[in-house]
Each structure stands twice: as C-alpha cells, then as structure tokens.
Amino acid sequence: MTLRAITSGIGLAAAALVLASCASDTETTTTDSGVELVKDGTLTICTHLPYEPFEFTEGGEVVGFDVDVLKIAADAEGLDTEVIDTSWETITSGEALNTGQCDVAAGAMSITEEREAVMDFTDSYFEAKQALLMKAGAGYESLDDLAGKKIAVQDATTGADYTRENAPEDAEIISFEDSALMQQAVKTGRADAGVNDNGLLNYFASQNDDVEVGAEFETGDVYGFSVKKDGNDALLDVINDAIASDEYDAAYEKWFGTSAE
C-alpha cells in the first residue's frame, strides 16, 4: 500500500469517527407527546450565567424567572430540568442547540431576525427596553450626556448594538463577557455608565444603593426561548402553553413584584 493510500485511509477513518461522534452527540429521545429530548426524562436548558433575575446561581442551584417558566413546561410533560452554563455566543449562534448540548436555550434573549435565521423561537414572554445604569446621583439623562465617557456593555447583546449605534463618537465603549462584569464596572467606577436590558439593571439597582437606573430607551425588544431550527415544534407548543398559563403569571409576580401585562 502506498503512503498516499495509507494517509487517505487514515483520513477516512478519522472522518468516520468524527461523524460517529456527531451522531452520538445529537441522538434524541421522544416523549409520548412528541417532544424530542437530548436526555431521557429531562428538559436540558442552555443559558449564560449570571443574568439576574432571569437566571443566576443561589445556594448552589440555578434559579430565576426563565428557569421557573421552563419548569412549568417541564412539569407539564413530567420532566426534570437541568441547566447548562455555556457562552452567550454559543447560544445566539444556535450552536448549543445544533450540537445537541440542550433542548432549549434561555437567557432573556431578544428575538431578532439574525437569531431567527438559526433558531426557532417561542412566543414572546417578556417585553424589554434598554436602560442606562450609573452611579447614584450621576445625573446622566441620555447617551448624549456620555460624550467622552466610558460606557460598559455586554458582548453580543442588543444593548451593545444599540450603544454602538447611538453613543457619541468620542465615547469609549467597553465590552464585557457577562452582565455581572458589566454591572460591576459601573459600580466600581471603571465605567461611567452601562447599557443593558431594563429588567436586569432595575433588579441590580434594587440590590445596590450606590447605583441607579436613569433613562430607558424604546427598542422594541421582546424575549423568547429558542429550540433547534426546524427541529422541535412539539417542544415549542409545550413552552408556549407554559407562557400562556396562570403559573406564568405567578412566576412573573414572584420575580418582578407586579402582575404581567
């Protein structure tokens, strides 16, 4: 056998192993109602921590509004839930779903055309605005007030996109991997202000007296949960039923202190 043939054989064998690995990674089980799952008896959820009050760790357990809503869906199917923490880019690109890491992705995720191209979304379950976080008493009323200042944002978010499109040209935009780092940058003075979703920032301000939320910006953001593209309509139906349920209203009031509109 020639060296070229040996090399070709090794290459084909390696390719076969890769394909076998991919196939095993994406094997699913199916419930009686047609919901496909990557793990039998469990609704596996991908998210990026922390993003209070939607998902964060408390007492060694992942809790939050998103988690509670998805538990409503899981309970309806008699399923347990398991939360996997992964990078935000892996979620928004659809990779976490396409590679079989999880059944559903959550993370106070705004529904956008770009994301809809790679994932299927549930009905919207939360309306959001972008908001400005600052030190208490800073007095910033708009992005225009931040000329020459440092503005913190979170990577790959609609808030980061909005800030880059609307901030003064001489503002310095500092990007962070997660929301906790972004908020701490404002709290510690590393950044003069930060932009992110109002639900997140209002909750953070309620827990930290030295910061406050100022202006809010209407951007038309609505959140959805996502599943694999063209891959799990039955699961979409189950989650949409959870969003429309009385239990959803109770979860909303639990985390936000008011009734859902």
Image: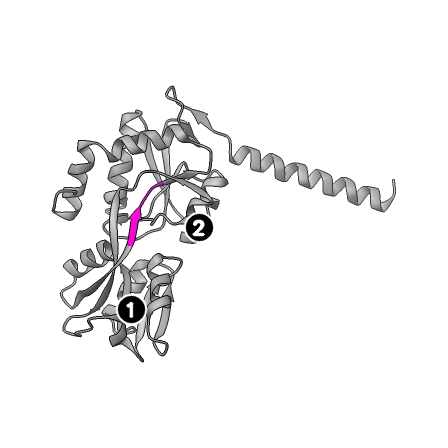
Residue lying at 27% horizontally and 30% vertically, measured from the top left: 241
Residue lying at 15% horizontally and 43% vertically, measured from the top left: 254
Quarter of the rendering containing residue 137? bottom left
How many residues crowd mark 2 within 10 Å: few (<14), some (14–19), many (20+)?
few
Residue 145 drawn at (x, y percent): 24, 76
Residue furthest to the right in view is: 2
Tag 1: amino acid: Ala
Quarter of the rendering containing residue 17? top right
Residue lying at 19% horizontally and 58% vertically, measured from the top left: 202
In what element is the residue under mark 2? Answer: helix
Q: In the picture provided, is 40 more to the left or to the right than 147?
A: right
Q: Up-down: is 234 above or below 170?
A: above
How many residues crowd mark 1 within 10 Å: few (<14), some (14–19), many (20+)?
many
Q: Up-down: is 175 above or below 80?
A: below
For the record, the magenta segment spans 220-225
Between 170 and 25, the one nearer to me in the picture: 170
Q: In the picture provided, is 79 more to the left or to the right than 2?
A: left
Residue pointed to by mark 2: 114
Between 109 and 144, the one nearer to me in the picture: 144
Residue lying at 32% horizontally and 29% vertically, measured from the top left: 238
Residues tagged 1 and 2 counted as in contact (Cβ below 8 A): no
Tag 2: amino acid: Glu
Between 156 and 189, the one nearer to me in the picture: 156
Is the N terminus in the top left, top right, bottom left or bottom right quadrant? top right
Label placed on residue 210? none
Is the C terminus in the top left, top right, bottom left or bottom right quadrant? top left
Residue 217 drawn at (x, y percent): 25, 61
Residue pointed to by mark 1: 185
Quarter of the rendering containing residue 157? bottom left
